[in-house]
Amino acid sequence: MASTNSGSRPIQHVDRKSLYTSLEARIRYLHSFLDFGANDVEALLSGSKYIQALIPAVVNIVYKKLLQYDITARAFQTRSTAFEGPMDETPDEESPQILHRKMFLRAYLKKLCSDPTQMEFWEYLDKVGMMHTGLGRTHPLHIEYIHIGAALAVIQDILNEAILSHPRLQLPRKIAIIKALNKVIWIQNDLFTKWYVHDGDEFTDGMDFGIIEKEGWLHGKKILDPDNDSEASNDTASPLTAEPKGKSKTPVGVCPFTGIAASTGNPKLSDEASTGGVKADVPAENGH
């Protein structure tokens, strides 16, 4: 039986070793600590079209920022596993390797709009962290963490400002979307840092990190499809807009998070539109 503290809530036991040897245990702990639950899943579901509308702008701003400094631009002078085309020695925003990377970032950001109730969602975010440390690549590429953290902060800043300034989203809905999205970004941040820091090395030394897979693939399955990526900002197709998990054909027990969306209920996030116009590239609250 769990011991209790001075308050009324029991102290939850967390096995330290499991945090470094089991991704599922790590994600469960982060979900619990950040209170990532049914309301966040519902907010991401309802906010998916707004987030996807921002992706082209986010990608352009991020790469403009990365190319602004020689220390971050130098990473694009190294050939990646997936790109076999021509490369500019001094890359700019229209260089072949940058256009290729933009395509993958758009596909990755769309992945963030997919179903977070599936373990595959978090497994791929973990793989993204691994690949930036040089693991899982035929041609190793190591990006120092300071640049990773800064880029994530830029993405978070852009999305927060855009959602907060949306002219027809009510404040409670804005808050819910931003809270849920920020939790996902901070979990992604953790899934980067776990590959950089040495915490838990006594448990992970000598671990087999699996076979090398192509970028965008997980367990032999294509997760990101940049070939079908579109610049269109009003592309709202997303697994989050599919039928509720309660109607899914996914066998019970396949994923530790299966069923979380079915328990969302109906959070009282107002859909009423405020007055004021909507820019052409921003979906209206009742738009499709």
Image: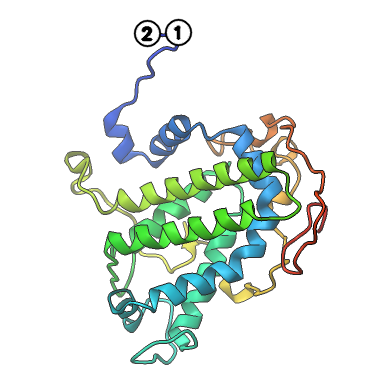
Residue 11, quarter of picture: top left
Q: CA distance from mark 1 to mark 2?
A: 7 Å
Residue plotted at (34% across, 55% down):
210
Residue 214 or 38: which is nearer the viewer? Answer: 38
Which amino acid, mark 2?
A: Thr
Residue 152 or 249: which is nearer the viewer? Answer: 152
Crowding around mark 2 (Cα neighbors within 10 Å: few <14, some 14 to 19, many 20+) is few
Residue plotted at (31% across, 27% down):
15
In this picture, residue 259 sits left or right of residue 155: right
Residue 46 or 150: which is nearer the viewer? Answer: 150
- The label shown at residue 8 is 1
Crowding around mark 1 (Cα neighbors within 10 Å: few <14, some 14 to 19, many 20+) is few
Residue 245, quarter of picture: top right
Residue 225, quarter of picture: bottom right
Which amino acid, mark 1?
A: Ser
Is residue 256 visible in the rendered image? The answer is yes
Q: Which residue is mark 2?
A: 4
Q: Position of residue 200 (x, y in %)?
A: 22, 40
Q: Position of residue 46 (x, y in %)?
A: 71, 46
Foreground label between 1 and 2: 1
Is residue 224 visible in the rendered image? The answer is no
Q: Quadrant of the C terminus?
A: bottom right
In this picture, residue 128 sits left or right of residue 181: left
Could you tell me which secondary element the residue under label 2 belongs to?
A: loop
Where is 72 relative to 111, above or below?
below
Instruction: Tell me whether the residue at label 1 lies in contact with that at label 2, contact meaning CB atoms closer than 8 angstroms.
Output: yes
Could you tell me which secondary element the residue under label 1 belongs to?
A: loop
